[in-house]
Image (cartoon, grey):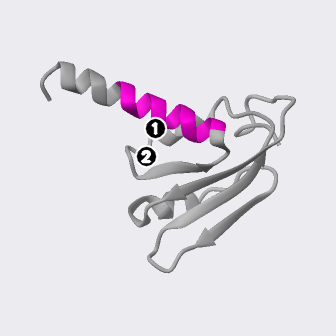
């Protein structure tokens, strides 16, 4: 499957995204093409497991959840997300926030 059916790639990525319970309903309501599995956690959070051919769209999409979602796998996506958050935090510190 392509990443959210817009970008296609030559890779194969097994992604896991963790969603806090306050945004879990947004994920439960959505279905994307391809293999996906939602794992309901005891505290109301959910984890989305999905196979993608590209990670291009995943990180920007994660940012729309304003800190209520984060990548668990693959490591490249986790690293990119962490790097972006560190940059944002650095920008805020420079502004005195």
Q: Provide the secondary structure element on which disc 2 rests.
A: loop
Left or right of residue 24, residue 29 in this image: right
Residue under the image location 30 percent in, 30 percent down = 89
As displayed, is residue 53 above or below residue 27?
above
Q: Quadrant of the N terminus?
A: top right
Q: Are marks 1 and 2 in contact (CB under 8 Å)?
A: yes
Residue 82, image x and y in percent?
47, 36
Seen in the image, is 93 located left or right of residue 61? left
Query: Which quarter of the image is occupied by the C terminus?
Result: top left
Residue assigned mark 2:
65
> Which residue is at 55% across, 36% downward?
79
Give the CA separation, mark 1 to mark 2. Answer: 5 Å
- Give the residue at mark 1: 63
Return the x and y of residue 90 as percentages of the image width and height: 29, 24
Q: Is residue 45 above or below residue 59?
A: below
Q: Badge 2 local density, few (<14 within 10 Å), some, or many (20+)? A: some
Q: How many numbered marks appear?
A: 2
Q: Which residues are magenta?
A: 76-87
Residue drawn at (16%, 20%) of the image: 95
The chief SS type of the magenta part is: helix
Q: Is residue 16 left or right of residue 84?
A: right
**Depth order, front residue of 41/57:** 41
Q: Residues within 10 Å of mark 1 (few under 14, many from 20)?
A: some
Viewer-side residue, 60 vs 31: 60
Where 39 sits versus 77, above or below? below
Q: Is residue 81 magenta?
A: yes
Q: Secondary structure at mark 1?
A: helix
């Amino acid at each position: 499957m392509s990443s959210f059916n817009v970008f296609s790639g030559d890779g194969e990525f097994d992604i896991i995204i963790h969603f806090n319970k306050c945004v879990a309903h947004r994920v439960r309501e959505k279905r994307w093409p391809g293999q996906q599995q939602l794992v309901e956690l005891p505290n109301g959070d959910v984890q989305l497991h999905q196979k993608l051919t590209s990670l291009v769209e995943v990180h920007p999409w994660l940012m729309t959840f304003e800190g209520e979602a984060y990548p668990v796998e693959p490591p490249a996506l986790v690293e990119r997300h962490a790097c972006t958050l560190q940059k944002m935090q650095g920008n805020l510190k420079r502004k005195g926030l």
